[in-house]
Image (cartoon, helix red, strand yellow):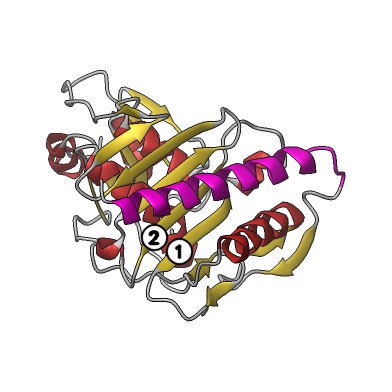
Amino acid sequence: MEEATRRELGVLHRIGLAVERVARESGRSPHRADVVAMGASGTPTEELDRLAERAILDALEEERLDWNVVSEEAGVVERGGRRTLVVDPIDGTANAVRNLPFSTVSLALGENDLGSVDLGLVRDLARGTTYWAARGEGAFRDGRPIRTRAWPGRGEVVFVNLGRFASPRSAALVGRARRVRSLGCASLEIALVAEGGGDAYVFENADGTTNLRATDIAAAYRLLLEAGGGMSDATGRSLERFPLGVTQRTTVLAWGDPAWAKAAWETPAP
């Protein structure tokens, strides 16, 4: 690994630890779920999100880095750099404020689109586990290499976004899969696919305004690719040119084995 990449990875690790400290300290506050603003993405910003984002921006100042920032809460923050840090300060806020153990901080370093992301880190805030990947270097969990698993053709575990916005196609997929999980934390669910804990992750809402942003998937995108998997939108279209911003949204089909992706939508719904 090049020294520059090693240094950048060190920064992401330190940011992840800083956010984890904030999340744990806020657990004692009765106001962690208070809505304090509307984020740049148009969704409510809870106090926990604001504190986590502040910790990230403060860390960049302490590290004396000029990285630009794309964040779900603050939007695009121009800081004069060539590199862009794409962050979801708390992915799975609804879980975190209810003390459900499915939330992360998601950090990705790139330039302008998902294809340009060459470093991604996902810190599981409940378990204290760190997933990270660098372009051409593989994917790791707490320093140990991880890989996706071959689809067995039966007995699959599929993470699917559920709820009232889920598309009819997602609902039909639930009826075909052997086992289904829905954790409400995209970066964590994709990381679990990357390490072979699941076979796929699907997010497709009928209302396009409620689908995912780059902040939700940028770090997990690099992680999954380096682990041997792949990601497209729900129609199979590449996400490589999906912009690193907060205004555009996309459906997501992420897989460990391309055989699953091919079979998923070809099988007629019951």
Q: Residue at x 33, y 56 (%)?
A: 4
Q: Is residue 133 visible?
A: yes
What percent of the width, then of the height, locates residue 109? 39, 60
Tell me the amino acid under the disc marked 1. Answer: Leu
Q: Quadrant of the C terminus?
A: top left
What percent of the width, then of the height, locates residue 53? 64, 60
Among the 4 quarters of the image, the one containing residue 114: bottom left
- Marker disc for residue 61: none
Q: Is residue 6 above or below residue 79?
A: above
Say which residue label 2 marks: 109
Q: In what element is the residue under mark 2?
A: strand
Observer-nearest of 263 and 103: 103
The stretch of residues the image draws in magenta is 3-30
Say few, some or many: other residues with alpha carbon within 10 Å of mark 1 (under 14 / 14 to 19 / 20 or more): many
Observer-nearest of 212 and 163: 212
Observer-nearest of 110 and 244: 110
What percent of the width, then of the height, locates residue 171? 38, 41
Q: Is residue 205 visible?
A: no
Q: CA distance from mark 2 to mark 1?
A: 5 Å
Q: Left of 221 or right of it: where is 261?
A: left
Q: Most extreme residue toward the right, as rendered?
A: 30
Q: Residue at x 48, y 50 (%)?
A: 12
Q: Are marks 2 and 1 in contact (CB under 8 Å)?
A: yes
Asked whether residue 236 is drawn in magenta, I would say no
What percent of the width, then of the height, locates residue 212? 43, 58
Q: Left of 126 or right of it: where is 84?
A: left
Asked whether residue 6 is drawn in magenta, I would say yes
- Marker disc for residue 85: 1
Q: In what element is the residue under mark 1?
A: strand
For marks 2 and 1 on the same chain, the one whose residue lies earlier in the sequence: 1
Tell me the amino acid under the disc marked 2. Answer: Leu
Q: Residue at x 64, y 69 (%)?
A: 39
